[in-house]
Image (cartoon, helix red, strand yellow):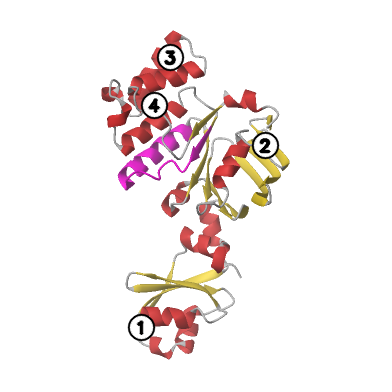
Amino acid sequence: MTEYAIHAEQVVKKFGDFTAIEGINLSVPKGSIYGFLGPNGCGKSTTIRVLTGLLSPTSGSVNVLGLEIPRQSEQLRLKIGYMTQKFSLYDELTVEENLQFMGQIFGMNRKALTQRTNEQLKTYGLDERRKQRVSSMSGGQKQRLALAAATMHNPELLFLDEPTSAVDPENRREFWEQLFDLSSQGTTILVTTHYMDEAERCHRLAIMESGEIRADDEPEKLMQQMGVNIVEVKAPNLRKLKESLISYPQVRSAAQLGVRLRVLIHREVTHPIEWLKSVEPSLANAELTIARPSLEDVFVSVTGKGRQ
């Protein structure tokens, strides 16, 4: 148990007749960045609330940082940080006041509070904004402040619920650099996202749909384990071609990317390019290339319409 920050077995969460989480198993190694990828409404946020003790599971067992949840959730609260999807700090307070308020909640004395506030302002590039009211900050600045607040008390485990949904790509990239810094210092991070590029950055990844975990491994391994080959086709009339190809049982899915059609073909087809040309004579002189799998391909193949 000790090598895992989170260990959950057969966790079910029901709200009346609705099952939000359906028998999930989860083992999150200490010090890792563990991603939850899935569409809105798939159960990611509910899972986080169960793991933090905010919701009690209907059945199953949850152990977080060696504590039995929800029975020991009060002890857990001092050891974790939680950054919600919606910015939840105080707009009328300054940057510095928000951080000090968070530190006081966790019982820091005045000396420790001053020292830690200064450290966090420096780490998250907010030093020159310490007296600025939060209401006048940009989305990226608010996000950095939210992360600084969530880590004020040096939590062992950090829960991030879609933390980058309202910021631009540059701020997202910077935010992830800060997560890797935290991870290298020993903090375990569980992050939910619906961005494929973010999911690829995680050490390990669970793909969720309809309250179930459909796949769980290192992103690179998930891509290698796909039972498909991917062919990119550059040809005219891609919309018509797509309609034709998805009618074949050998084709798992097809999606247009600009001027190319990305076709996922089951591995039992040993020569996918030759097979495509044989079933679609119009492709005889088209440009067909084998492509590297992406996480989006994995996602499509284990969820929704991609599942056979």
Residue in front for this viewpoint, 180 or 17:
17
Q: Residues within 10 Å of mark 3 (few under 14, many from 20)?
A: many
Left or right: residue 94 versus residue 198 is left
Residue bearing mark 4: 90
Q: Nearer the viewer, mark 2 or mark 3?
A: 2
First along the sequence among labels 1 and 3: 3
Q: Marks 2 and 3, how far apart in space?
A: 33 Å
Residue bearing mark 1: 286
The residue under the point 64% across, 45% down is 26
First along the sequence among labels 4 and 2: 2
Left or right: residue 170 versus residue 266 is left
Residue bearing mark 2: 56
Q: Marks 1 and 3, how far apart in space?
A: 65 Å
Q: Position of residue 18 (x, y in %)?
A: 65, 51
First along the sequence among labels 2 and 1: 2
Q: Nearer the viewer, mark 1 or mark 3?
A: 3
- Residue 259 vs 61, above or below: the answer is below
Q: Which residues are magenta?
A: 158-184
What is the quadrant of residue 80 in the picture?
top right
Q: Nearer the viewer, mark 4 or mark 1?
A: 4
Looking at the rendered image, the quarter that the C terminus falls into is bottom right
The residue under the point 35% across, 82% down is 237
Q: Nearer the viewer, mark 2 or mark 1?
A: 2
Residue bearing mark 3: 113
Residue in front for this viewpoint, 38 or 92:
92
Left or right: residue 169 versus residue 216 is left
